Image (cartoon, rainbow, N blue to C red):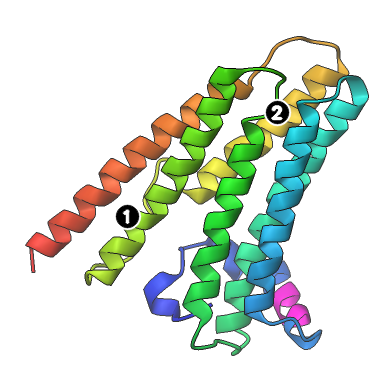
């Protein structure tokens, strides 16, 4: 994780006692921010694999895989929180921190959303929606980083930034686990991916507008 002023997403969670205590404990245990960033990809792979498995199973096993995907998503987000806290509050920033801060996140977004594309059996529409959502999620981050490289502030606006995408997918996982366990055939994966894709398009448009406006005002 690199420079705090340049690339940190505003998060109120950083100010909580449990987050500060956990970040301090991780630093004392010898975990460094770059390693935590890489670990986030592992948890994203867990979520993606669980989604794919959910598309190939049924019954309680499928419900369990949706819950496993939710767990993987949340652990990924915790890594995203603590890599920055260990780096900045813990004083373990590195010169290459920005690379480790950004690149693993792009892999994580893609792995999770492509996994969702296969969370239901045999649906070409679902596959297309998942891949589209993955591509658009990466473009949202690209626009933010592009603006920063051109000299603007980092614009983290939504409505479908990473926290919102992951929150929506977590809710999807929990609801689908309940529906599957109850034997209900309702499938919410398609509309969720469609909502994420539409939200990402709007996010790209908003961020692009902010970047262009800031550049033109200089």
Q: Are marks 2 and 1 in contact (CB under 8 Å)?
A: no
Q: Is residue 26 above or below residue 135?
A: below
Q: Is residue 209 left or right of residue 59?
A: left
What residue sits 49% from the left and 25% below the top? 194
Magenta range is 21-26
Which residue appears farthest toward the left when viewing the image?
A: 217
Considering the image in quadrants, where does the N terminus appear? Answer: bottom right
Image location (x, y in percent) of residue 86: 64, 80
N-terminal label among 2 and 1: 2
The one nearer the camera, 1 or 27, is: 1
For disc 1, the marked residue is 143
Residue 172 in which image quadrant: top right
Q: CA distance from mark 2 to mark 1?
A: 29 Å
What residue sits 77% from the left and 86% below the top? 30
Q: Is residue 127 above or below residue 200?
A: above
Q: Which label sits on residue 119?
A: 2
Q: Is residue 152 magenta?
A: no
Image location (x, y in percent) of residue 54: 79, 29
Classify mark 1: helix, strand or loop.
Answer: helix
Classify mark 2: helix, strand or loop.
Answer: loop
Considering the image in quadrants, where does the C terminus appear? Answer: bottom left
Q: Is residue 145 left or right of residue 135?
A: left
Image location (x, y in percent) of residue 188: 64, 20
Image location (x, y in percent) of residue 84: 57, 74
């Amino acid at each position: 994780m690199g420079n705090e002023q340049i690339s940190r997403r505003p998060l109120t969670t950083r100010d909580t006692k449990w987050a500060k205590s956990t970040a301090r404990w991780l630093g004392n245990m010898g975990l460094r921010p770059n390693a935590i960033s890489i670990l986030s990809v592992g948890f994203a792979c867990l979520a993606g694999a669980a989604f794919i498995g959910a598309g190939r199973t049924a019954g309680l096993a499928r419900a369990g895989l949706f819950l496993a995907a939710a767990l993987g998503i949340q652990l990924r987000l915790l890594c995203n929180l603590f890599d920055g806290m260990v780096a900045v509050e813990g004083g373990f920033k590195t010169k290459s921190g920005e690379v480790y801060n950004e690149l693993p996140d792009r892999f994580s977004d893609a792995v999770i959303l492509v996994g969702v594309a296969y969370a239901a059996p045999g649906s070409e529409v679902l596959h297309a929606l998942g891949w589209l959502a993955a591509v658009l999620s990466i473009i949202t981050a690209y626009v933010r980083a592009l603006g920063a490289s051109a000299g603007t502030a980092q614009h983290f606006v939504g409505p479908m930034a990473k926290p919102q995408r992951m929150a929506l997918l977590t809710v999807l996982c929990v609801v689908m686990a309940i529906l599957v366990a109850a034997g209900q055939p309702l499938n919410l994966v398609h509309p969720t991916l469609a909502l994420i894709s539409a939200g990402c398009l709007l996010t790209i448009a908003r961020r692009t507008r902010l970047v262009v406006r800031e550049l033109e005002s200089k």
